[in-house]
Image (tube, rainbow, N blue to C red):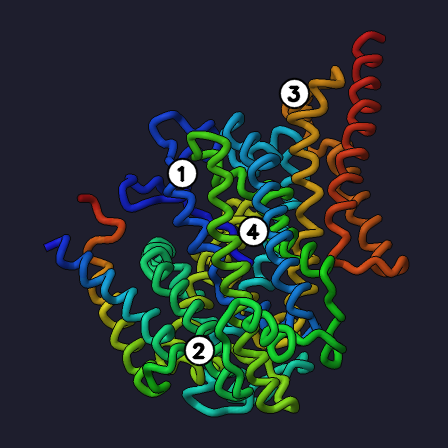
Amino acid sequence: MRRALQGLSWLALLGTIAPAVLYLSGGLELAALKTAMLLATLLWFLTVPFWMERPR
Amino acid sequence: MSSASAEAPTGPAVEPVAAGEFEREPVPERARLGFRSFVGMYAGEHCAGTELMIGPLFVASGVSAFDLVVGLLVGNALAVLSWLVVTAPIATRVRLTLYRQLERICGRRLVTLYNLANGVMFCFLAGSMITVSATAVGVLFGFPMPALGDAYPTGLGWVLAVLAVGGLITVVAAFGYRSVARFANLAAPWMVLVFVAFGLVGLSEFLRTTGSEVGSPGELWRLAETAIWTGGDPLPGQVKFGFWHVVFFAWFCNGAMHLGMSDLSVLRFARRSWHGLASGAGMYVGHFLAWLAASILYALQLHRDPANTDVLPGPMAWQACGVAGLLCVVVAGWTTANPTIYRAGLAFQAIVPRSPRFTVTLFTGAVATVAGLFPAIAMRLLGFVALYGLVLVPMGAVVFADFWLLPRLGLRSWWAERRGLRVHPAAGLAWGGSLAAALLAVRFGGLPIYFAALPAWFLAILLYVVASAVVQRRAGEEAAG
């Protein structure tokens, strides 16, 4: 479970930065970037409290 | 810029060390932490709400691309070196908090005065973070927000937003400091990436707006020089920044933490003194990437509308990254104002020990909120941060001289403790004398405040060593007589 949550959190971080890289390369519109970053933000804060700074 | 952490650093694999532990004794072996704990702590701590003000204010100061980029590389390297060779070696040898060391060197009364200065500075700093968060509220409600030159509240909407944000931050700091500290740690990796996204989106917009194409680092640099950080005159009311301004600002914006020795309280947990290198994570993530990213957003705003000189992190973040950007502004301001208010409360509580911490924190938060109402502090943040470093740095020089120089000159360290003094006159003279000399040089000698902390640090060392020699010789003569 912990590993799955960690995987989702890493995915959220990727989802936070990747849209900006795609926008820079012309592969994404600004509105889509904003939506993708919001979804990634939600995913990060929904998953990270369950594993980060918690004893293994 | 950062607030000093009141917590010891923690890491995912490390059992947290509670604040308040080992306040008066050296950190034992079992509580010491590895390098990774400090990397995470510094990276998170130096990616704060104030970075969103500082980056744009560089642009407002008419900085050029070379001066900014190379100046930040050099200034941050000097800051890391200061942590590495000045702060960490003493922290890992003595392993006491700054306050405990100052008590032994300077005496309790002088430490109380230092705490007062520290607490007041922290209040204003927290106020500027509340200002930053309130600009995000302005995006949602659309009330008039302060312009670059504004010193006073701009209307009822602004006042209500600052009171709401400041009140919330204060109550949370008083009730649940620890939970917000944990939330800050959880938010840090996400926040760093949102800052980087600000920069990438800003850069993309520059390419689209100017019709430029960038296929090589050389072309990117040309865009930076000709469109982003173009140099020239500063905006009205701002000081012109050149290379050395940037170097010294980057070096001394956290001067209170390294040469001022506040981070003795943090690095005393480090297993080895080279762990001071971890400060590089904070400098090059927060004080390089984040500052550049925030400055790109502001440069873009000016490029599109030169008349729009407002430095408002909320609207800039909203335009670049939408709701995620707005959340980043709120979280960055909140998570850094929280420990700052808590820390200021601790400083004030040391002055009035009988008052409950809850009440003191509420009082401190109220002062910070009132300060946040006045945009002058946030809009003049570069100067305020320099003043903050200048006031606290000389006390670090006293600690440095007391530890390294006095024993080599045949003089005794920790004089106040040895003699039971409440005020060690040599330390008082070193702090007051160097600070007064620096402020006079700034006020009447034309020395820019950004350059004042370094000479003040050396002057404090000189004054402390000479005055200690006089005081200790007299004490020896009295004992002999």
- Front residue of this view, candidates B24 and B212: B212
Residue at label 1?
B35
Residue located at (82% from left, 7% from top): B480
Real-space Cα distance between discs 1 and 2? 33 Å
- In primary-sequence order, the first of circles 1 and 2 is 1
Is the residue marked by circle 3 packed among few (<14), some (14-19), or many (20+) residues within 10 Å? few
Instruction: Name, please, the residue furthest toward the right.
Output: B444
Mark 4 and mark 2 in contact? Answer it, CB < 8 Å: no
Residue A38 left/right relative to B288? left
Which label lies toward us, 1 or 2?
Answer: 2
Figure quadrant of residue B111? top right
Residue B145 left/right relative to B166? right
Residue located at (48% from left, 41% from top): B266
Residue at label 2?
B201
Q: Is residue B64 above or below residue B82?
A: below
- In primary-sequence order, the first of circles 4 and 2 is 2
Real-space Cα distance between discs 3 and 2? 59 Å
Looking at the rendered structure, whether the residues under marks 3 and 2 are on a common chain is answered as yes
Circle number at residue B348: 4
Mark 4 and mark 1 in contact? Answer it, CB < 8 Å: no
Q: Quadrant of the N terminus of chain A?
A: bottom left
Query: What is the chain letter for disc 3?
Result: B
Q: Position of residue B400 (x, y in %)?
A: 66, 32
- In primary-sequence order, the first of circles 3 and 1 is 1
User: What's under tag 4, amino acid-wise?
Assistant: Phe
Circle number at residue B418: 3
